[in-house]
Image (cartoon, rainbow, N blue to C red):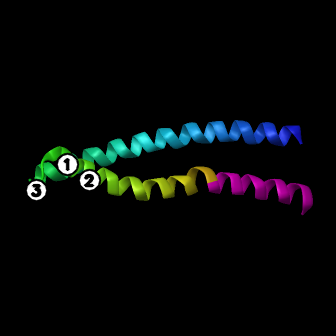
Amino acid sequence: MFGLIRLFAILMVLLTVIYWALVFYCRAGERDRLEAEWEAEQPPLPRHTFVENGIREYQRSLRRKLLWGVYILPIGAICALIYFVNYA
């Protein structure tokens, strides 16, 4: 039982580091894409407003995808693996 708790604690720390690294990486890429889009189109909004509005919209969709991809799927796969190894 203690081994399972230790595995879960280490896994959560590792997945949290991965999650935040992906958040910063994806936001930087999206910011670059939005700045390039602003340069190409020259919309009536100022550059910083256009980029911040785009980042706000992108952030909503990004968090949900990253939560599933970084936390839910790996933990679910590990739980399924533990179950099948021990009980099937």
Residue type (three-letter) at the residue carrying disc 2: Asn
**Numbered disc 2: secondary structure:** helix
Residue stretch rendered in magenta on the structure: 72-88
Amino acid type indicated by mark 3: Pro
Q: Residue 53 shows which numbered tag?
A: 2
Q: Residue at x 18, y 53 (%)?
A: 37
Number of other residues with Cα within 10 Å of mark 3, as a class: few under 14, some 14 to 19, many 20 or more = few
Q: Is residue 76 magenta?
A: yes
What is the x, y in percent for residue 34? 23, 50
Tag 1 near tag 3, CB within 8 Å: no
| Mark 3, residue position | 43
Residue type at tag 1:
Thr
Q: Position of residue 40 (x, y in %)?
A: 12, 53
Residue topped by disc 1: 49
Give the foreground label among 1 and 3.
1
Kindly report the distance in space between the C-alpha atoms of the residues bearing marks 1 and 2.
6 Å
Cα–Cα span, label 2 and label 3? 13 Å
Give the residue drawn at x 84%, y 60%.
84
Sequence-first disc among 2 and 3: 3
